[in-house]
Image (tube, helix red, strand yellow):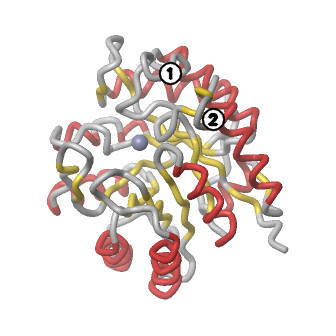
């Protein structure tokens, strides 16, 4: 029986879903803080953040990130904050313009891949630059792995001292069209490879759309951590739009119980990820 705590990441907004897809997608700063707070109360220990302009288009404006981070520090004591540096492929170094705000973590894709309608571009130069900015500001990366090469790249960067000084944390993303498919044997091989290359690493599985739940089930069974949220999936089930991020977190917390796991508290999640205690 595995009763190990599971870090629940809630990806509240993303760069794609709009109010027309689900009116619960939080767009304004106030909506993002409120939605995170509810998800936090439901068991999320880590929030993955993108910010939007008022017209719902994605932005990396540090001013906007700053207001959200400030609100979260006030209203969600101890929650791990993670900013996305990935939502605006093609925007170059603007994607890291908020790192000086010192969130706890930031996403870092260590290679390029095809997405549904475009190339998700992460040139070696940009990856190195983003990693260096993160390291300078004491921000721990969550490596977004869309294929095997990205795992090897992350391990090499870690060994070369280019990342935050703590064990690697990787997120395996499955189910983005044209990228890594949803395949349990592949996931198991990736997890095995990660354990071989970086035995102290932690990992999360993330799936898109209806595969969100599939990846949660597999991750819980294989000892990983889980991600949910409207960024990846706007439905509770085939026929029901999720009324909130919190509803998705509650659904995942229930699934944890079915796998003899339980949601990690923010303090436990910080310890698991080797992040400093909340001050
Ligand atoms: Zn994201």
For the point 43% across and 40% down, the residue is 83
Is the residue 154 above or below the residue 89 in the image?
below
* Mark 1 lies on residue: 22
> Could you tell me residue 12's position as x and y percent?
52, 33
Q: Camera-side residue: 112 or 198?
A: 112
Is the residue 268 above or below the residue 9 in the image?
below
Is the residue 72 above or below the residue 105 in the image?
above
Q: Which mark is residue 236?
A: 2
> Could you tell me residue 194's position as x and y percent?
47, 79
Q: Camera-side residue: 195 or 69?
A: 195
> Could you tell me residue 257's position as x and y percent?
82, 55
Q: Dividing the image into 4 quarters, which one contains the N terminus? A: bottom right
For the point 58% across and 36% down, the residue is 238
> Could you tell me residue 145's position as x and y percent?
38, 63
Q: How many marks?
A: 2
* Side of 144 relative to 80 (left or right): left
């Amino acid at each position: 029986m595995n009763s190990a705590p599971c870090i629940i990441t809630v990806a509240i907004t993303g760069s794609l879903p709009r109010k027309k897809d689900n009116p619960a997608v939080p767009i304004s700063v106030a909506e993002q803080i409120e939605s995170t707070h509810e998800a936090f109360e439901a068991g999320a220990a880590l929030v993955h953040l993108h910010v939007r302009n008022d017209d719902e288009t994605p932005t990396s404006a540090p001013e906007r990130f700053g207001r959200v981070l400030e609100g979260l520090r006030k209203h969600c004591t101890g929650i791990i904050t993670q900013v996305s540096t990935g939502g605006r492929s093609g925007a170059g170094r603007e994607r890291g313009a908020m790192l000086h705000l010192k969130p706890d973590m930031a996403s870092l894709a260590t290679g390029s891949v095809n997405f549904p309608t475009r190339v998700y571009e992460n040139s070696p130069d940009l990856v190195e630059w983003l990693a260096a900015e993160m390291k300078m500001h004491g921000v721990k990366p969550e490596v977004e792995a869309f294929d095997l090469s990205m795992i090897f790249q992350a391990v090499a960067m870690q060994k070369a001292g280019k990342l935050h000084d703590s064990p690697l944390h990787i997120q395996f993303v499955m189910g983005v069209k044209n990228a890594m498919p949803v395949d349990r044997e592949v996931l198991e091989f990736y997890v095995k490879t990660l354990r071989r290359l970086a035995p102290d690493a932690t990992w999360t599985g993330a799936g898109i759309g209806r595969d969100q739940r599939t990846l949660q089930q597999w991750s819980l069974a294989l000892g990983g951590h889980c991600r949910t949220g409207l960024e990846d999936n706007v439905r509770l089930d085939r026929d029901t739009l999720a009324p909130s991020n919190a509803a998705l977190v509650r659904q995942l917390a229930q699934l944890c119980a079915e796998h003899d796991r339980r949601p990690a508290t923010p303090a436990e999640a910080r310890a698991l990820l080797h992040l400093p205690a909340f001050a």
